Structure formats: C-alpha cells, structure tokens
C-alpha cells in the first residue's frame, strides 16, 4: 500500500520550492551567525575582552512619571490608619509629554514659566487635579497679573533634593523657566536617617540603579507585551499582602545612630546646589518649608504614624520632631544666606486635619491655601512694580 503521508510531505516541498529554499537558507544563516558569535566570544575572552553589553547596566534614576501616562488612583488602604480625612473616590492623574503632572503647559509662548519641584507633598496625588497648588498658584497669578503663565508640577513621591537636582538639570533648565520653587523636607530626612547618605549604593533611594541582563530583559518584555496584566498583578499582590510598602525595611529594628550635624550639612549642601544651579542659569530660585502636623503635642493620627509599633529604635516622637524642625530651619537658613525667597508654609499653614490629611500632605483645602500664599509671594517676582 502506498505511503500517502510521505507522498504528501514530498509533494509539499515539491510544490513550494521557493519557500523551502528560503527556509533552508535562513536556517544556515542562523547557524553561521550563532557559530560566529560563539567564536568571537571565545576569542574575546581569550584576550581578556568583556563587552559592555555583557555586564550589568547602570542608570541614573530620573524621578518622574512616564510621559503621557493617564492614571486613576485610589487612596491606599494601608495608609488609612494614618489619616483622619475621608477618601471616597479615585483621583485623576494626567502626565504631559515631558513627565510633568497636568494641567501644565497651557501656552506655546507663555509670558512666564514657573516649575515646582519636590516630593509627594508637591505632587498632591490625592487632591483633585484642578486643586493642586502648583496649578492653582499659576492660575491665581494669571488672574492678578494678566500674564500668560505655564505652571509645571514636577513633584513625585519619594523625591529628595538629589532627585530635584537631577530633574532641574535634565528637564527644567531646557524649559527656560523664570522661577523654580522647591519644597522638600521629610524625604531628605528619611533618606539620610536610614541610608546615611544620598549615594548609599544598593539602597532604596540610591540615585544609581543597577540591572542585571535577565532583570532588564524580563522587565522590558513585560512592559512591551503584557503591561496591563503586569499592572493588575502588582495591584493584586499589593492588595492581598495587606502590608505597607516600606522601602527602608532593611533599617527597621536597628538602633539608629543619628549625627544631626551631618544630616543638616548634607541637606544644606543639596539645597545650596539647587540655588546655585538656578542662579547660574538666570532662574529665580524659591525655597519653601514643608507644612506639617508635627506639633509638640501630636494628635493620635500623627503619633501613630511616627510610632509605627516602635519599629524605629532610638527615634522617639520628640527626637523625630526635633530633626524635622531642624530641616525646616535649614531651609530658612540657606535662603537667608543666599538672599533667596523662602515661603514659610510650615508657619503659615495651620497644623491641623482641616488642611493636611496626615503628617505632611495637603488635602484640597490645604492645597488651595498653599496656592494663595505662594501666589501672593510670587506676584512681585512675576510682575515687579
């Protein structure tokens, strides 16, 4: 009996000679390429040559949101014990093409450009997007001066002064802003307390990120092929764990050795760098102290946040308050020495739950008040008499 299966196979190759030739050619090309790669690898290694593509990749972290991203954020459940405000909705976050939080670039040829830099207290994630103080301050100044103003929000959660320097040099200067307003305190204090330095290699907020080949390849593949599934998985994992994310977990439970003079020196040095960089590029630098609820007699929400089950040994509430207040004093002192405007939100915004939903973050009312204070101080800079 004839073997129809073999006839069919033979007939396919006979019927498609061009496809067969292409397939065979491609196969031999791949074999040659692979063999050549292995030969060159062997030869290079024999001569002590290791290519850049074979080793770990290092990057300077740019603390920004992905340009063009559109997000809807829900207040994190694990932070509910540390707030006495009520959050019942999602908050829209729209990122422009340069990684700034919108609304931002209203005009192609503005009269004035203001850029706000800082951490989560500047980004104001859990405030309605048209109530975030960088945006509102710009609109108030437009109404009062008649100038067309682009007001950029360059805040991002976790950012410290070193991140601001990076953003300032690589993103802000090209915008040719008239004014850069910087506000940060608690992120710098946390970084220096738990890591000892802005440049502590391999720690949570190191400016350098090192990725092994398998890490960046895997990350790239997930972001290209399954970005939504990957996002959903991360959210589900976070929800099921029920644990608070703690980037300084490695330092918890250890006795903190606190050198306050060094902490203040390092913070002041970075503030000085921001001021000098702005002046070198003919930008008016403005520093702001950080509004807060860290009072002599804390309310239960604030006390609970600092205590966190006593996980920070050697850091009592009063000790933390002393350090935090010293950092705000450092901001004032750097401003005074450099004859730079300091907007003292720590003194002008009431330290209560009507304006701040936790230790340092504005709610809608606090953000609006901060915007009015900022606009009143900047009016003379935007429209000098």
Image (cartoon, rainbow, N blue to C red):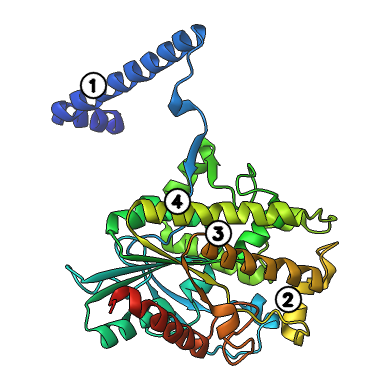
Q: Quadrant of the N terminus?
A: top left
- Locate the C terminus by quadrant: bottom left
> Which residue occupies 29% across, 28% down?
6
Q: Is residue 385 above or below residue 53?
A: below
- Mark closer to the chain start, 4 or 3: 3
Q: CA distance from mark 4 to mark 3?
A: 10 Å
Q: Kindly identify which residue carries mark 1.
A: 25
Crowding around mark 4 (Cα neighbors within 10 Å: few <14, some 14 to 19, many 20+) is: some
* Image spot of residue 197 (x, y percent): 65, 48
Task: Tell me: 173 left or right of 256.
Answer: left
Relative to the observer, which residue lies in front, 27 or 340?
340
Indicate whether 303 appears above or below 54.
below
Where's residue 151, x and y in %? 32, 72
- Confirm whether residue 92 shows in the render: no
Circle number at residue 151? none
Q: Which residue is mark 3?
A: 160
Q: Which residue is mark 2?
A: 305
Label 1 vs label 2, nearer the camera: 2
Which structural element holds mark 3?
loop
Q: CA distance from mark 1 to mark 2?
A: 67 Å
User: Measured along the vertical axis of the image, is residue 299 above or below residue 154?
Assistant: below
For mark 1, give the secondary structure: helix
Please give the label number shown on residue 166. Answer: 4
SS for dot 4:
helix
Q: CA distance from mark 1 to mark 3?
A: 56 Å
Depth check, mark 1 against mark 3: the one in front is 3
């Amino acid at each position: 009996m004839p073997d129809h299966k073999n006839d069919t196979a033979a007939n396919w190759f006979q019927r498609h000679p061009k496809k067969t030739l292409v397939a065979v050619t491609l196969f031999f090309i791949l074999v040659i390429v692979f063999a050549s790669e292995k030969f060159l690898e062997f030869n290079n290694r024999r001569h002590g040559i290791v290519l850049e593509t074979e080793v770990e990749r290092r990057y300077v972290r740019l603390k920004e949101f992905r340009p063009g991203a559109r997000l809807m954020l829900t207040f994190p459940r694990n932070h509910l014990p540390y707030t006495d405000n009520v959050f019942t909705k999602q908050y829209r976050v729209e990122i422009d093409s340069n990684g700034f939080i919108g609304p931002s670039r209203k005009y192609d040829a503005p009269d004035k450009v203001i850029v706000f830099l800082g951490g989560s207290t500047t980004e104001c994630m859990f405030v309605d997007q048209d109530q975030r103080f960088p945006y509102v301050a710009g609109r108030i100044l437009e109404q009062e001066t008649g100038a067309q103003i682009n007001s950029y929000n360059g805040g991002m959660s976790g950012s410290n002064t070193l991140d601001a320097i990076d953003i300032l040099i690589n993103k802000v200067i090209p915008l040719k802003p008239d004014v850069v307003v910087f506000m940060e305190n608690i992120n710098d204090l946390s970084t220096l307390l738990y890591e000892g330095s802005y440049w502590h290699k391999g720690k949570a907020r190191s400016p350098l990120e090192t990725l092994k080949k398998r890490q960046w390849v895997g990350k790239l593949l997930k972001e290209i092929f399954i970005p939504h599934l990957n996002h959903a998985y991360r959210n589900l994992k976070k929800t099921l764990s029920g644990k608070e994310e703690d980037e300084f977990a490695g330092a918890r439970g250890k006795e903190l050795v606190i050198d306050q003079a060094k902490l203040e020196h390092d913070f002041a040095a970075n503030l000085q760098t921001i001021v000098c960089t702005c002046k070198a590029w003919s930008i008016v630098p403005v520093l702001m102290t950080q509004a807060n609820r860290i009072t002599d007699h804390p309310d239960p929400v604030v006390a609970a946040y600092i205590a966190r089950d006593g996980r920070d040994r050697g850091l009592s509430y009063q000790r933390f308050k002393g350090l935090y207040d010293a950092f705000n004093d450092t901001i004032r002192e750097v401003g005074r020495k450099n004859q730079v405007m300091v907007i003292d939100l720590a003194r002008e915004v009431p330290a209560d739950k009507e304006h701040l939903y936790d230790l340092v973050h504005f709610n809608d009312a606090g953000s609006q008040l901060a915007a009015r204070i900022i606009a009143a101080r900047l009016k003379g800079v935007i429209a000098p008499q």
